[in-house]
Image (cartoon, helix red, strand yellow):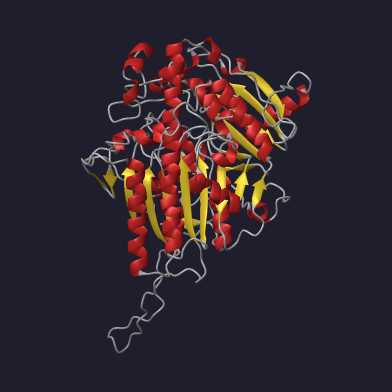
Amino acid sequence: MRQILAAITLWITASGCYAQQDCKAVPEPAFDGVIGRTAEASTPSLLQPVRPPADSPNVVYIVLDDTGFGDLGCYGSSVSTPNIDSLAKAGLLFNNFQSKAVCSPTRASLLTGRNAHSVGMKELPGGDQGYPHTRGRVPASAANIAQILGRYGYSTFAAGKWHLVPREDMTPAGDRTHWPLQKGFDRFHGFLSGWTDQYRPDLVVDNHAVPAPERTAYHFSEDIVDQAIAMLSGKLEADSEKPFFLYLAFGATHAPIQVPKRYIKRYEGAFDDGWDAVRERRFRRQLELGIIPSGARLPPRNPGDPAWSDLSETERRVYARFMEAYAGFTEHTDEQIGRLISFLRESGQFDNTVIVLISDNGGAPEAGTKGNFARSYGDPTTVEEMHERLDELGGPGTQPLYPRPWAMASSAPFKYYKLWPFNGGVRTPMIVSWPDRIRTPGLREQFIDVIDITPTVLDYLGIEAPEAFDGVCQMPMHGESMRAAFEDPAAPAPRDTQFFELWGSRGIYHKGWKAVAFHTPGTDFESDHWELYNVEADFTETADLADQHPEKLQELQKLWWTEAEKYGALPQLEAIPMRQRTYNQILSDPAP
C-alpha cells in the first residue's frame, strides 16, 4: 500500500499539476445529523440545494476564433459589428489583452485561470510528447470555472467549439473524461475538434455524436445560438432565480470561411484596394478612436507578404472576394451575438450578466500567400481555378481560408499573426459588459492576460478558488483579479510579468518591457535571435532595442527561464511532426 501511495504522489507531482500539498480533500456533502439504531433515536439532516447569493450575476464567455485585433468595428474595422460595438460602448474595451496565439492554450487558460503549459495544453491537444505540458488534457488538479460555479449553484452550459481533448478521445469508444459534460457543464452542443464545416459540422450533443443537420438553410453559428437560447430558456422556466454560466465559443471566424451569399454581397467592392490599404485604413481609424496611442507607428508589411500592387488582376479579384466573404462571416457572427443579447434583454437577465468577449489569437496565416479555396488546409486549387469558381466561395462546396496578408490586416496595427509571439499573434480584442456594475465604461490599457479573466469573475462572486475539488488537490490560480481595472481606468495592472511559449518561440513581458525569440524549426534553441521592445513606449513593437539595452535583454531572458520552470513549460520542444509540416509550410511561403 505504501508503494502505491508513493506512486500516486509521484504521478501527481510529475503531472504538471503543482498541487498544494497541504490541501484538505474533505468528502462532500458532510452529514450533520445523528444516526442511531432506529429512526426514533436518530436525527435526519436533509440536503439543501446550494444557492449562491440572490444578487449573483450570470456569467457569459464569448470566444471568437482567429479574429484579429483590427477585425471588429469598435477596434477600427469598417466591417459592421453593431452588437459587439454596443457591448464595448457601454462596457469596457481593452487594448492590451494577451491571448496564447493559438486556440487550445488560450481556451484552457481562459477556463482554468492557469497558464496553458501548467494544465497540459502547451499547444493543440494530441501528439503527447511524453511530458506533462504536452498531454493535451487538462488535469483534475485544475478545475475550471464551470466546475467551480456548478458547485456554487450555477447552471452551466457550453455551445460551440471545445478543442480541449485529443482526437483519439473523440471516437465512440474514446475516453470521455475531458469532454464538456465531464468538465463541469450541464449541457453541450457543438464540436470537439479544432474546426468544422459550418454547413455540415461534426456535431456532438452532450456526450454523443449526432448527424449533421440536413436542412439547406443551416449554419453552425446560428445553431449554437439557437441552442444556447433554448438551454437558458429551459433553465429560466424551471428556476428563474438560479444564475447561469454560458460558454459560447464560435467556430467563426476560423476557417472555413463560410457564410450565406447575401452577407458576402454586402461587401462587394469594399476591399478592391487590397490588404495594404485596408491595414493602413484600420490603423488610421484606431488612432482616431483613441484605442491605440497617438504616437503608435504602423510596422512595415511582413516579410514575404506581397504588396497588393504587385498582384495580377486575377489575383486581386480573387483575393478581394476572400475578404468580402470574411467580412460577411464576421458580420453574420455579430448578428448571432445580437440575438443572444436580445434574449438576455427580453428575459430581464442582461443588466446582471457579466459578458466577457475575446478572440483566441490573431489573424490566421496558415493558407500562405495564395489562400485555400476547396479545403482549408493543403488545398492545391490554383488562383485561375479559384477565379473560375469565384461565385462558389463561402458556399457549401468550398472551405476557404484567406491569403496570409489578410491576416496581417486582421491583426492591424501589429506585425505578424496567429502562432507568432509578437503582438499580431497574442494581442486580440477583449470586451466586458456588465450594466449593473460597470460605472466607468471606456478604454482600459492595463496589461491583461487571458489567465486573469476567471480569477476576476470569482473575485466579484466572492468565491475562493478551491484547495481541493472532487478529492483532488488543486494547483493555485495563476491569474490575478483585474477588478481594480474594471472600476478605475487608472488602476495598476493586476500583474507585471507573463511568459509565452509556442512551438519553440518564446516571449516574456515584464514591467513594460517585452523580449521575444522567434524559433525557426529544426534549429538549435540557443541560436534563436532575441528582440527587445519597450512596449509602453512602442505599442506596435517597431523598434528592437536589444543592441541598445543588452543588460535588459539578459534580465528578461533569465526571467523567462524562471517563469518557464515555475509554470511547467520545460523542456523546450518543437511541434510534433504533423504540425511541424504545417508550420514549415507557413514559414517557407516564403519565410519571414
Q: Is residue 442 left or right of residue 386?
A: right
Q: Is residue 528 left or right of residue 583?
A: right
Residue lying furthest bottom: 40
In the depicted view, which residue is nearer to us: 203 or 146? 203
Q: Position of residue 83 (x, y in %)?
A: 49, 48
In the depicted view, which residue is nearer to us: 154 or 564? 154
Q: Position of residue 412 (x, y in %)?
A: 59, 29
Q: Measured along the vertical axis of the image, is residue 355 above or below residue 302?
A: below
On the question of residue 103 being in view, the answer is yes
**Where on the picture, by quarter, is residue 279?**
top right
Q: Position of residue 268 (x, y in %)?
A: 44, 28
In the depicted view, which residue is nearer to us: 472 or 327? 327
**Where on the picture, by quarter, is residue 196?**
top left
Q: Position of residue 18 (x, y in %)?
A: 52, 44
Q: Measured along the vertical axis of the image, is residue 495 above or below residue 276?
A: below
Q: Residue at x 63, y 34 (%)?
A: 285
Q: Residue at x 44, y 50 (%)?
A: 338
Which quadrant does the C terminus fall into?
top right
**Where on the picture, by quarter, is residue 554?**
top right
Q: Residue at x 31, y 33 (%)?
A: 197
In the depicted view, which residue is nearer to us: 358 or 435? 435
Q: How many marks?
A: 0
On the question of residue 177 being in view, the answer is no
Q: Measured along the vertical axis of the image, is residue 45 above or below residue 96?
A: below
Q: Residue at x 45, y 39 (%)?
A: 331
Q: Is residue 535 left or right of residue 548?
A: left
